[in-house]
Amino acid sequence: MSNILANERDGECRPWTEWKIVAFLLVAILGLEIGMRAIESKLSIDLLHQTEIPTIFVDIKNATGPRVMFLGNSLVRESVDIEAFETVYGEQPLTVAKSNPDNTSVVEWRYLFADAVAGEKLPADLVVIGYAEDQLSDNGIVKPRRLGVNYLKAETQAEIWSSDVTSFSDRSELLLAALLHSFAHSERVRTRVLEGIIPMYRGTAQRLNGATPRSLRRSNAEGESPERTYKRFDQIVQIAKERSLPIALVAIPVGDAYELDGAFVEDCQSRGILHIDARNVDGIKAPDNFLDG
C-alpha cells in the first residue's frame, strides 16, 4: 500500500517537475539569445559589417556628389581600397561605400540590392558588383540560416520560399534562424570555440581546404558541371533598370584560375552592362596575395 501511495504521489508531482524543466529551458534559451544579440557584432568582422549595412546605405543615399556602391563578398572587402579608388577618380568629391558580407553570392546579393534601393532615393550613381567563378549564377549554395537571420521579411518571404528554400527541413532552419540569433550564429560560435581550444585550428583548416582543388570543391557541393542560369542576377538588373541605375561587373582574381561564362559576358554587354575582366592583374599573384586560399 505504501508503494502505491508513493507512486501516486510521484505521479502527482511529475507534471510540475516537467513544467519546471520546460520553464528552465525557456529561460536558458532566452538568456542565451539575449547574450548572443549583445555580443554578435564582436564574434567576427563579418557580423559587425552586417550590423552596419543599413547605416552604410543611408549614408550613401544622403551623400552629395558622385556616389559609388560596391556589392559583393569578402573579395570586395579585401580587393577594393576606397581611399585609393577616390584618389584615382580625381579631385571631385566622391562617396564610396561597400556592402560585402562574407561567403555570399547572388543568392543573397539580390536581397541586399533590393534593400539598398528601397525608398525614393537611389543608393548611388553606379553600383559595382565584384564576383568570382559562379557567384553570379544560380548555382550558389543557399544558406537558410543566413537568409533567415538577415533577409527574411514580409516582403521577401514569398520569394525566399519559392526560389531559395523549398524543403521542410530548410524552411524550419530558416524560421529558427529568423527567430533565434543564437541558432543562426551557432556555427560561428563553434569556430571561435575550436580556435580557442585547438592550437592552429584556423590555419590548419585553411590549408586542408586549400589542398582540395577548387573545381573539386565546387563539384562536391553543386554536382558535376551544373547548368548556369542567371535568374537571380536578372532580378538585380530589372530593379536597376526600373531606377535607371547603371551596373558594372568586375571579375576579381582569386588563388586559382577560373573561366568566365562567355555567353553571360556577351549578354551583359548586349544589355549595356559594363563587364571588366580583372582576373589577371599585374602585382597580384598566388600564393603571395591569397594567404587564406
Image: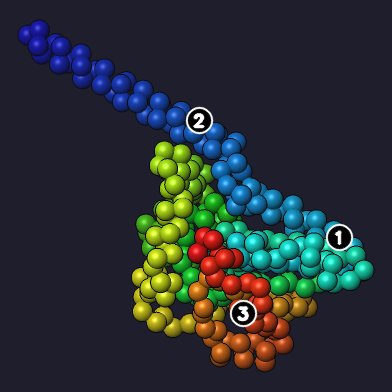
Q: How far apart are marks 1 and 3 (CA)?
A: 33 Å
- Kindly identify which residue carries mark 1: 63
Closest to the observer, 72 or 51: 72
- Image check: 289 left or right of 4? right
- Image check: 265 left or right of 176? right
Residue 35 image-quadrant placement: top right
- Image check: 214 left or right of 60? left
In the rendered structure, which disc, 2 or 3, sits on the residue that comes first in sequence? 2
- Kindly identify which residue carries mark 2: 31
Q: Label 1: few (<14), some or many (≥20) within 10 Å?
A: some
Residue 38 image-quadrant placement: top right
Percent x, y of residue 128: 71, 72
Query: Residue type at mark 3?
Result: Asn
* Element under disc 3: loop
Q: Label 2: few (<14), some or many (≥20) within 10 Å?
A: few
In the rendered structure, which disc, 2 or 1, sits on the residue that comes first in sequence? 2
What's the mark number on residue 280?
Answer: 3
Percent x, y of residue 266: 62, 91
Q: How far apart are marks 2 and 1 (CA)?
A: 40 Å
Closest to the observer, 98 or 80: 80
Q: Residue at x 14, y 11 (%)?
A: 5
Q: Residue at x 71, y 53 (%)?
A: 54
Q: In this view, does 273 lie above or below 91?
A: below
Query: Residue type at mark 2?
Result: Gly
Q: Which residue is drawn at 71% across and 61% down?
A: 98
* Element under disc 2: helix
Percent x, y of residue 65: 90, 66
Closer to us: mark 2 or mark 3?
3
Going by the picture, which residue comes out furthest to the right?
91
